[in-house]
Amino acid sequence: MTTGAASITEPLPLSQRAAFLEALAAELERYPAEARGHGLLHRLGRELQRTFLKNGPVAVGGKYGRRARFPPCRH
């Protein structure tokens, strides 16, 4: 079982994970302490994932703005 932060950063390249978590922490700070919880964390995490995957070094276009993780099979 993975923790929330680990599962949120999993789709991102290792090189982007620290910056992603810093951006997520900055977004969470904008909300009062009583409003912060798992739901808010995951909602903000999903929104930031889209931004990082769309504008990051993995983005190459397509429906979700990212490329496949593995090269196509050549038999």
Image: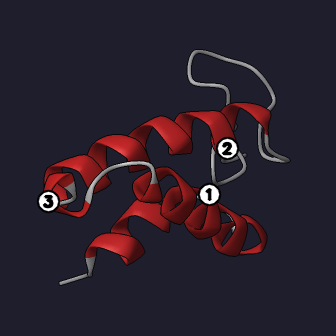
Q: Residue at x 67, y 44 (%)?
A: 52
Residue 18: horizontal and vertical position, in percent?
67, 75
Circles 1 and 2 in contact, beta carbons < 8 Å: yes
**Mark 3 residue element:** helix
Residue assigned mark 2 = 52
Label 2 CA crowd tier, 10 Å (few <14, some 14–19, many 20+): many
Query: Circle 3: is it few (<14), some (14-19), or many (20+) Cα within 10 Å?
Result: few
Answer whether residue 41 is visible to the viewer in this image: yes
Distance of label 1 from label 3 (alpha carbons): 20 Å
The kind of residue tagged 1 is Ala
The answer to whether residue 11 is seen in the rendering is: no
Where in the figure is residue 51, as x and y percent of width and height?
63, 35
Q: CA distance from mark 3 to mark 2?
A: 27 Å
Res. 68 image quadrant: top right
Q: Is residue 63 above or below residue 26?
A: above
Q: Which residue is mark 3?
A: 34
| Camera-side residue of 47 and 22 | 22
Q: Earlier in the sequence, mark 1 or mark 2?
A: 1
Q: Quadrant of residue 8?
A: bottom left
Q: In the image, is residue 67 above or below residue 26?
A: above
Which quadrant of the figure has residue 5?
bottom left
> Considering the numbered disc 1 on the image, is that residue within a helix, a strand or a loop?
helix
Indicate which label's residue lies in the foreground, 1 or 3: 3
For badge 3, the amino acid type reads Glu
Q: Mark 3 vs mark 2: give the one in front.
A: 3
Residue plotted at (65% across, 40% down): 53
Of labels 3 and 2, earlier in sequence is 3
Nearer the observer, disc 1 or disc 2?
Answer: 1
Q: Which mark is residue 23?
A: 1
Q: Secondary structure at mark 2?
A: helix
- Could you tell me residue 42's position as x and y percent? 28, 51
